[in-house]
Image (spheres, grey):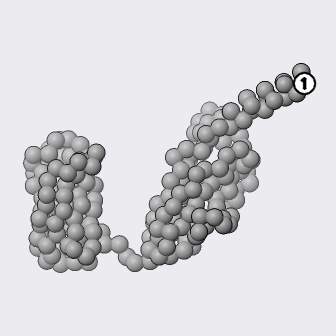
């Protein structure tokens, strides 16, 4: 009877810890990798560890927090920046919530090459704006082709734009409120940006 009671309490205890880590994501920030995750409200845990690998098999600890993690009443958002990932290759990350849970592995490619960027404005498009400006950095007077997508990835328009210096224009008078994605290429580089129409 004691054994059954112990197993029942153990199962209840483990269930209270299940799925504590949510929203685990990694993102490139310059030559570093940002790591974010949420510890869902519930019983406290005794810390967390962040692991890194370059082959997805052999992980090494890059950060270990040994304090109390988690709160009975509110979710806890945690972020960390890995300032020395392996450049020009895929990096792998996982988080362990001690002693109950380990996330699936996230993979991310980190490059030391500067990214070609595109800025769109006004963003959001409001009121009587009918033209969206596109500023392409580090290039001048180029022709780019591509697509305008809605938030579900459906192509809405095929685009062919020639910039004047580093700026191009796109008519958006016929777009309904929502989120849109621009994807353009000059045949060598890819330029992309998101914008919102909120009239």
Q: Is residue 135 above or below residue 124?
A: below
Q: Is residue 44 above or below residue 57?
A: above
For image coordinates 60% across by 45% down, the residue present is 21
Q: Position of residue 175 (x, y in %)?
A: 14, 45
Mark 1 surroundings within 10 Å by alpha-carbon count, few (fewer than 14), some (14 through 19), many (20 or more): few
Q: In which quarter of the image is the C terminus?
A: top left
Q: Which quadrant of the view contains residue 12?
A: top right
Return the residue nearer the eye: 36 or 125.
36
164 sits left or right of 42 in the view: left
**Can residue 165 be seen at all in this image of the molecule?**
no
Q: Where is residue 154 in the image (x, y as percent from the top left)?
A: 23, 48
Circle 1 sits on which residue? 2
**Can residue 117 be seen at all in this image of the molecule?**
yes
For image coordinates 74% across by 31% down, the residue present is 11
For image coordinates 26% across by 66% down, the residue present is 191
91 sits left or right of 130 in the view: right
For image coordinates 56% across by 63% down, the residue present is 92
Q: Where is residue 182 in the image (x, y as percent from the top left)?
A: 23, 58
């Amino acid at each position: 009877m004691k054994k059954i009671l112990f197993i029942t309490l153990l199962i209840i205890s483990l269930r209270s810890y299940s799925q504590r880590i949510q929203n685990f994501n990694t993102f490139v920030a310059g030559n570093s990798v940002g790591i974010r995750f949420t510890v869902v409200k519930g019983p406290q845990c005794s810390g967390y560890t962040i692991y890194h690998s370059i082959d997805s098999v052999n992980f090494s600890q890059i950060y270990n927090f040994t304090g109390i993690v988690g709160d009975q009443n509110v979710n806890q958002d945690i972020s960390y920046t890995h300032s020395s990932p392996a450049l020009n290759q895929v990096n792998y990350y996982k988080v362990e919530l001690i002693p109950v849970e380990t996330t699936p592995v996230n993979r991310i490619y980190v490059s030391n090459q500067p990214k070609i960027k595109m800025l769109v404005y006004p963003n959001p498009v409001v009121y009587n704006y009918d033209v969206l400006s596109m500023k392409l950095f580090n290039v001048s007077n180029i022709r780019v082709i591509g697509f305008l997508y809605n938030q579900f990835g459906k192509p809405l328009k095929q685009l062919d734009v020639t910039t004047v210096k580093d700026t191009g224009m796109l008519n958006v008078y016929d777009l309904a409120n929502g989120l849109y994605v621009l994807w353009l290429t000059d045949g060598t580089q890819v330029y992309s940006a998101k914008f919102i129409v909120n009239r």
